[in-house]
Image (spheres, rainbow, N blue to C red):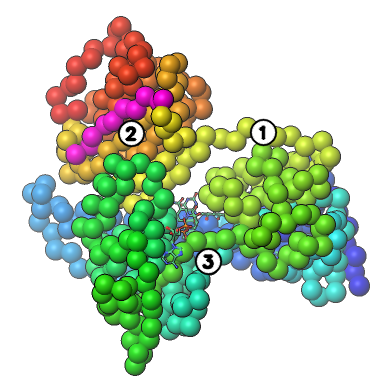
Amino acid sequence: MTDLTCDVAVIGAGTAGLAAERSARKAGATTLLIDPAFNGTTCATVGCMPSKLLIAAARTAHEARNAGALGIRTQVDIDGPAVMRRLRALRDDFVSATRAGIDRLPDGVRITGRAHFTGPDRLALGDGRSIRAGAIVIATGSSPMIPPPYRDLPHHLLTNETIFELRDLPKSLAVVGAGPIGLELAQAMARLGVRVALFDHSDRLGGVRCDDVHDALKRTLARDMDLHLGSDPAPSVQDGTLRIDWGTGAETFDKVLVATGRPPDIAGLNLAATGLALNDRGMPDIDPESLQCGDAAIFVAGDANAVRPLLHEASDEGATAGRNAVSYPAVSRPDREVPLAITFTDPPLVTVGAAPTRSDAIGRADYTNQGRARVENRNVGLARIYAAAPGGRLTGADLFCPGADHMGHLLALAIGRGLSATDLLALPIYHPTLEEGLKPALRDICKAVPLKIPADRDTRTPPGA
Ligand SMILES: Cc1cc2nc3c(=O)[nH]c(=O)nc-3n(C[C@H](O)[C@H](O)[C@H](O)COP(=O)(O)OP(=O)(O)OC[C@H]3O[C@@H](n4cnc5c(N)ncnc54)[C@H](O)[C@@H]3O)c2cc1C
Ligand SMILES: NC(=O)c1ccc[n+]([C@@H]2O[C@H](COP(=O)([O-])OP(=O)(O)OC[C@H]3O[C@@H](n4cnc5c(N)ncnc54)[C@H](O)[C@@H]3O)[C@@H](O)[C@H]2O)c1
């Protein structure tokens, strides 16, 4: 039996694992990076990138269909196989770039295999080899949870791991689960001409925390698809045809996309052998800042810890976990970034910072009549911004409006820097832009706190703003 040794062993060569290995090696450690296939990250292969490629095609179709409002006549003819071919060609390019990075790892770092614990500092690979490490980073990611009734539908079931392999667009699609995956892919498929019905057993789409934003999102989605919220869809296959029954109705579909969550991939790790206390989901207690499990030399980064299952978080957490694995037992607890989550619906759905408390000042900006949004024929939705009274420091925002993906970054920066509504109003805000549309919300906050609007700033709203 081969016994490999290293300072830091990293399980999983996704975004978090690659970052963890990189940061541990940079800090002077000997490292091993273990993965069964080194196929590229979830983000590149079956996540962020292919989903955004489908969304890009859908946006183009939607804009072409609505071009008549701007006096441009078009006829939209969607070539499903071509849409899927482009998606896979560009996706494969992104995957190649990720794999090239993996190929550049120093000799001996890559270990092909599926690891499980045999002790707090010991891993087995299933082929007789074992590893002894000074510290271990778990970065095994997450995978789709498929509720039992859908597991028996092999010919109709799609998840994010299979949908991008379709050779052509389906004629009809049931989407079960209205989280970020369900919302993005349901809207994209619908705008590509697929008949879509979206189901969720919750009444709330995507866990949206603001009622006004939720109403606007629901109205927008309902233009393109049937919504069945608070429903309990039951699938069945009769004579080869998929049927979904939701109590008050039933319909047949070509395919069903199950997007009911992606829990951490920890089942095969035998965490019991680490000696860590595990909760009823088999998870150890993880410090969200240091990413350390209790006092052990074990760290968990990326989707595997379920703290913030997003790409930029996986990447940053990997860097922290790798560094702490080297400096153990002296671990650092860096402040987490301002929470920022973007669901790439059209318009984008964005959550920044904290939800409002009862004492917070709240500002509202309507985008249904906003100048630049009207110019672009994209005037839907709203933005709500929150500030802590009495100081007026910005604390959070919920947006569902054109440009929200960009403005979310601006607001995250302002919140992170401890800025107030006055500070933001003192910035140059160009006319006519979507950013300008935030001014009414910022002025609402100044009035409610109250805060002074900068004396050298006009309070008038420019024409069309
Ligand atoms: C459809 C979809 C769209 C998304 N869109 C976005 C987006 O637009 N923006 C965004 O920020 N986030 C998005 N995400 C989330 C983002 O993709 C994830 O947060 C991120 O990829 C997680 O990276 P990770 O390193 O934790 O996991 P992964 O990249 O999944 O890596 C985990 C690795 O661990 C390996 N592994 C598992 N078990 C073992 C074992 N026992 N031994 C060895 N190796 C093992 C796996 O093979 C895999 O290579 C999306 C996700 C999906 C599914
Ligand atoms: N743009 C982005 O950043 C982006 C895009 C896609 C995915 N992601 C990440 O991927 C992860 C997984 O996304 P997701 O959308 O699969 O998960 P999710 O957990 O966010 O949402 C799952 C949804 O399915 C519903 N649901 C669960 N079981 C159900 C059932 N049996 N019947 C009907 N509805 C059911 C839930 O109520 C919930 O609304 C997320 O954590 C997210 O961070 C991010």
Q: Which mark is residue 144?
A: 3
Local SS, label 3: loop
Query: Residue 367: within the magenta?
Result: yes
Q: Is residue 88 above or below residue 134?
A: below
Label 2 within 8 A of ligand 2 by Cβ: no
The residue labelled by disc 1 is 334
- Circles 3 and 2, Cβ within 8 Å, touching? The answer is no
Task: Report the residue at 22% width, 43% height from top.
Answer: 380
Is 435 on the left or on the right of 181, as rendered?
Answer: left
The CA span between labels 1 and 2 is 29 Å
The residue labelled by disc 2 is 384
Q: Is residue 348 above or below residue 227?
A: above
Q: What x and y, as percent, mark residue 53?
A: 39, 59
Q: Quadrant of the N terminus?
A: bottom right
Residue furthest bottom as drawn: 239
Q: Which amino acid, mark 1?
A: Pro
Local SS, label 2: strand
Label 3 within 8 A of ligand 2 by Cβ: yes
The answer to which of 167 and 162 lies nearer the viewer is 162
Q: Which amino acid, mark 2?
A: Arg
Task: Report the residue at 28% width, 30% height from top.
Answer: 364
Is 289 on the left or on the right of 399, as rendered?
Answer: right
The CA span between labels 3 and 1 is 30 Å
Q: Is residue 145 visible?
A: yes
Which label's residue is closer to the chain start, 3 or 2? 3
Local SS, label 1: loop
Would you identify the image quadrant in which residue 381 lies? top left
Q: Which amino acid, mark 3?
A: Pro
Is 393 on the left or on the right of 22, as rendered?
Answer: left
Dominant SS of magenta comes to: strand
